[in-house]
Amino acid sequence: MKYTFKTLAMLALSFSFSTGFAQETPKEEDFYKINKVKTPEGTILEVGGLVTLPNGNLGISTRRGEVFIVENPTSNRPYFRKFASGLHEILGLAYKDGALYCAQRGELTKLIDKNQDGKADVYETVYAWPLSGHYHEYSFGPKIAPDGSFFVTGNVAFGDEMWYRGESRVPMRGWTMNITEDGVMKPWATGMRSPAGPGMIDGQLYYTDNQGDWVGSGAIWRIEKGDFIGHPAGLRWSGRADSPVKLSEEFFRSKMDERRNVDANGRAIKPENRVDEEFKTLFQMKKDFPMLRLPSVWLPYGILGISTSEPVKIPEGAFGPLAGQILIGDQGMSIISRVFMETVNGVEQGASFLFRSGFRSGVLRLGWGTDNSLFVGETNRGWGSAGDANEGLERLTYTKNPFEMRAIRAMPDGFEIEFTSPVDRKSAEDLSSYDVESYIYKYHPVYGSPPVNLEQLKVKGVKVSADGLRARLIVDNLRQYYIHTIKVDGVREKGSSSALLHPIGYYTLNSIPTGAKLSMSEVSTKNSGKSVKASTTPSKTKATGDKPNADDPSAAVASADKPISTAAPTYAQVKGLLTNYTCIACHNADKKQIGPAFRDIAKRKYSPEKIVSLIHNPQPQNWPGYSTEMPPMPQVTKADGLKIAAWINSLAK
C-alpha cells in the first residue's frame, strides 16, 4: 500500500497542535508554485531525461525514443524542436562538447548535429551491453564523471517463480558501468536493484534505488569504485577479471543462509514478510561484507517515496535558504523530497523531508533552469503514479521563504534542529512540541520490509539558541544506523501562529558524534502535558544481536484478545491508520492509482478477515494489469486491519 500525496499532504499538515494559540496551516503552493510547461499539441513527452544546455535551452529525452530541444523553456511560449527519434526508451540525457549522449535500453549513444540544421544526423554507438529481453532491464544515465567518462546504471530482471526476485541474466544487470568516450567499459560497482536515479553531486556519483527484494526502502547512496550496495543479483559477474567487487555470490549466500528458502528440489520458497521474526539488517552484515556501502540517507517507504528517482543539488541562489541541499524525485508518489547531508566521524548521513507534492504525473527527472527554477520531467506509463496524468513537463518556482526545518544535525546526546526563520521561544522550549522515535528495515530476500524495532524515544530537554534559529534536543537511547523520526509539530514561527510547512524529518544516524553533551541545568524541561503517543506500528521485532523493546505498547494491541466492533468506521476514524500504514501511498478511495481504488476492492465483497489476510499476504494475481505488485504489510495489526477492512467494505453501499 502506498500514498496518494494530494491526500497525504493535507494529512501531514493536519496534526493537532497544543501551543496555546490559533494555528495557521501553511500550504506548499504558497512557497513553491507548480507551472505546467506548454507543449505542442499531440506531443507526448513521457520524460526519461533532462539536461540544461549551455545556451539555456532544455534537452529532453523520452521513453518513446525521441529527443527534443526546447528553446526559451522558462518563457510562456517555449519552442519544441525534435532533435532525434527512433531510439529505444531513453532514460537519461547528458551534454558534452557539443553532443548529446543518451542511455538507450541496450547502449550508450552519442547524438551529433554535424551540419548544424538543428537535428541529429549521426547516431553513434559508444558502447553496447547485453540484454535478455526482460521488460525490467531498464538502463539509466549517463552521468558525466569529472574525468569526462560516463556512468550508466542497469536494472535487474525479475524471476520467473517470484515476480519480485531480482536476477542478473546477462552481464552488468544490477551494476554501475563506467564508460569512456572511446567505448571502453569498466564495471564500477554492483548491488543495485532498480537504480533509476544516478546523479553527480559535487563531482561525486550518487544513486537512488527502489524498494524490493534486499532493499527495505528507497534511499540515496554514495558510490565508490568496488562498492557492493546490497542486492546480490549482480554478484553473478563479480568473478570477471575486470570486476572491482571481490565478493562472490557463493560467499554472500552462505552468510545470508538462503538455503532455508529452498525446497528439496532446489526451488525457491517465497519467504514470509513477518514482523515478529529474527532478521538481519544491512549494518549487521558489514563485518562479513566490508565492501558493503550503507545508505547515506533513507527515504522512508510510503512516506517519502515508493519509486525514488533523480537526485539533484539545489544551486546557490535557488530556493532561498535551502541552497546546497539535495532534491530527490519520486515516480510513484509524484513528489519531491529534500535531503540535508552532513559528515560525522568521516561517515555521511543526514535527514530527509517532504519538499513538494501535487505533480501531475510520476516525477522521474529534475533539471535546473538558468533562472534557478526547477524543471520536472514526468511519466507513469506501466508504472503508475499518484498524479492523474500519464506524462508531463512542469516547472517549479520559488516565491518566498517557508518556515521549515532547514536542517537536522546529529549531536552526542540528541539532535540539533536548524530553522529557516526564528521560532517562538515559548513553543520551542516546550518538550510537548517534539516527538522522536527510531526504527530500521530488514535486510532479506523478501519484497521490501515493514519498519521494525520501532521504539519511542524520550526527549529530556531542549535548548533554544539566542537567535531562535536552532533548537538542540537531548534524546535518550540514540541508536546507530537507525532512522530517527523527529516530529516538531508544536513549534511556531516567531511573531506568528504559523506551523512548520513540513513538521517531520527522518534522520539516518550512521554515526553518533563525539564531543560535549548538554547538561540538564542549561536546558528547558518544561512540558505542557502532552502524553507520549503510542505508535500504530508494531515493534515486537527482533533483529539478530538487537534486544527487543519489552515496553512496546503496540505489542499489547496486536495480541490483546478483545472484542472488535463490526460497525463500519468513517473515513475520519481510519485516516490515521491509512496514513501510518502508508495505504494511501498506492490507493485512492475512488480511482485507480498504483493499486486499485478502495471502492473497487469493496466490490469484490471480501470478508473483513479476508482483506486482513490479503494485507498480510497479497495475491497480485487477483489484480491483473497492475505493474507494481503490493508488498506484504505484516505490520498492520489484526485490530487495525479489521477497521480498515470495515471502512473499505462500507464503500460498496
Image: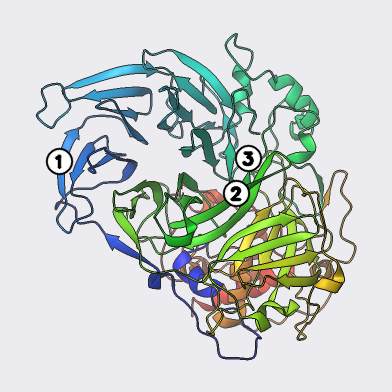
User: Residue 81 — which label?
Assistant: 1
Name the kind of residue labelled 1 in the image. Arg
Mark sitting earlier along the chain (3/1): 1
**For residue 225, what is the image quadrant?**
top right
Q: Amino acid at mark 2?
A: Met
Quadrant in which the N terminus is drawn: bottom right
- Is 325 or 136 nearer to us in this picture? 325
Q: Secondary structure at mark 3?
A: loop
Between marks 2 and 1, how big is the CA–CA gap? 38 Å
Residue 59, how many percent across, how many down?
26, 39
Where 635 falls versus 130 (above or below)?
A: below
Picture coordinates of residue 449, whole percent (x, y): 67, 49
Q: Residue at x 14, y 56 (%)?
A: 77
For marks 2 and 3, give the CA distance.
26 Å
Mark nearest the camera among 3 and 1 is 1
Residue under pointer 3: 213
Which SS class for mark 1? strand
Residue of label 2? 341
